[in-house]
Image (cartoon, rainbow, N blue to C red):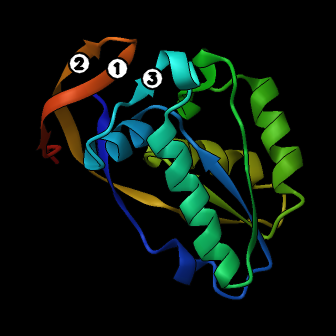
Amino acid sequence: MPIHFNDLDVVSEAAGLSSALIVPCYMCPAVSVAVRENKPFIQFFRNFLKSAPFGQYMTALQSRLKEHGVKTKVFKSIPSHEWFMCMWTSGKRKKLQKCAGQHDAVIVLGCDSATETVRGVVKSIDCKVIEGMEVAGIMNAQLRFHLPGNVSFENCKTVPISQ
């Protein structure tokens, strides 16, 4: 049951900045993008543990920001346990703080908990935190495996989160 997201206007939030570090959570936002584009979340034999639709989404975001004069870099997470930003190790958080210090802003692609993780990491440095996505609800979906190793989400519905 991943969280489902809607995009926010990152470009206008980044107006006037010269650089931004894009910090993605690699699970729920990646599922949201794959479902929205009706593409496999992961294709094990093409991209192994990377979501191609999410990678393309981040590349497009970087292009839009570049058109407005904002240089960007994507903060990478390789081990699968670090896909969930809310559960990053202290070492990963220290690495983020070091990288964020080289940018004017950090763009968070994730939930409120992911944003809180980033805010906690960058609170001691002068770095703006920009939310790139907002929670729309919880995704109710069926996980499907298709040969040759594709993982998709089907019959998806967004269930609102009760307040």
In front: label 1 or label 2? 1
Q: Quadrant of residue 137?
A: top left
The amino acid pointed to by label 1 is Val
Query: Depth check: 142 or 10 in front?
Result: 142
The residue that appears at 73% across and 44% down in the rendered structure is 75
Residue 148 coordinates in the image, percent (x, y): 38, 12
Q: Is residue 47 left or right of residue 141?
A: right
Q: Residue furthest bottom?
A: 16
Vertical arrangement, residue 120 with respect to residue 71, above or below: above
The residue that appears at 13% across and 46% down in the rendered structure is 160
Of the image marks 3 and 1, the number of the one nearer the N terminus: 3
Contact, CB < 8 Å: mark 3 with mark 1?
yes
The residue that appears at 31% across and 38% down in the rendered structure is 3
Q: In 3D space, how far apart are the residues under numbered discs 1 and 2 (Cα atoms)?
A: 7 Å
Contact, CB < 8 Å: mark 1 with mark 2?
yes
Residue with the mark numbered 3: 43
The amino acid pointed to by label 3 is Gln
Query: Depth check: 148 or 73 in front?
Result: 148
Residue with the mark numbered 1: 151
